[in-house]
Image: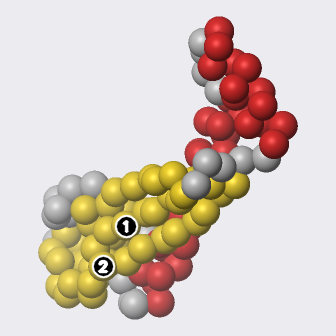
């Protein structure tokens, strides 16, 4: 699966646009990492537990996006993006989205 943030694929012809595709995941922070993050925020620095959680969440969301695109018969996703939002005080929604297309190499 080719995934790009661009709106086209250099060297490829887009034969068919199959529509929007999404991959969603919601992650909950555990109490231990939440307390650690609160303490760390007092002195500054990277919140490694949070960084790891978000990186894993992005991978999971992207994997779900690929599965959805494949179900539609796509071999590429263009205009790929991530979006995140907070749900309450401990949940984070991570959304990967883009446009599923069928493309052939020129």
- Residue 24 x/y as whole percent: 52, 69
Q: Nearer the viewer, residue 80 or 75?
A: 80
Query: Residue at left 69%, top 54%?
Result: 28
Above or below 52: residue 85 = below
Query: Residue at left 28%, top 55%?
Result: 5
Residue at which label 2 appears: 20
Q: Residues within 10 Å of mark 1 (few under 14, many from 20)?
A: many
Instruction: Inspect this view and state whether residue 13 appears.
Output: yes
- Residue 98 x/y as whole percent: 32, 68
Q: Earlier in the sequence, mark 1 or mark 2?
A: 2
Q: Nearer the viewer, residue 89 or 2?
A: 89
Residue 32 appears left or right of 94: right
- Residue 60 x/y as whole percent: 60, 62
Instruction: Inspect this view and state whether residue 60 appears.
Output: no
Determine contact: label 1, label 2, CB under 8 Å: yes
Residue at which label 1 appears: 97
Query: Residue at left 65%, top 9%?
Result: 43
């Amino acid at each position: 699966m080719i995934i790009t943030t661009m709106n086209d694929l250099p060297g490829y012809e887009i034969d068919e646009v199959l529509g929007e595709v999404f991959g969603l995941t919601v992650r909950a922070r555990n109490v231990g990492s939440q307390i650690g993050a609160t303490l760390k925020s007092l002195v500054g620095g990277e919140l490694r537990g949070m960084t790891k959680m978000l990186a894993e969440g992005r991978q999971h969301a992207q994997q779900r996006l690929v599965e959805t695109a494949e179900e539609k018969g796509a071999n590429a996703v263009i205009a790929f993006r991530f979006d995140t939002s907070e749900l309450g005080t401990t949940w984070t929604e991570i959304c990967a989205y883009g446009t599923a297309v069928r493309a052939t190499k020129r």
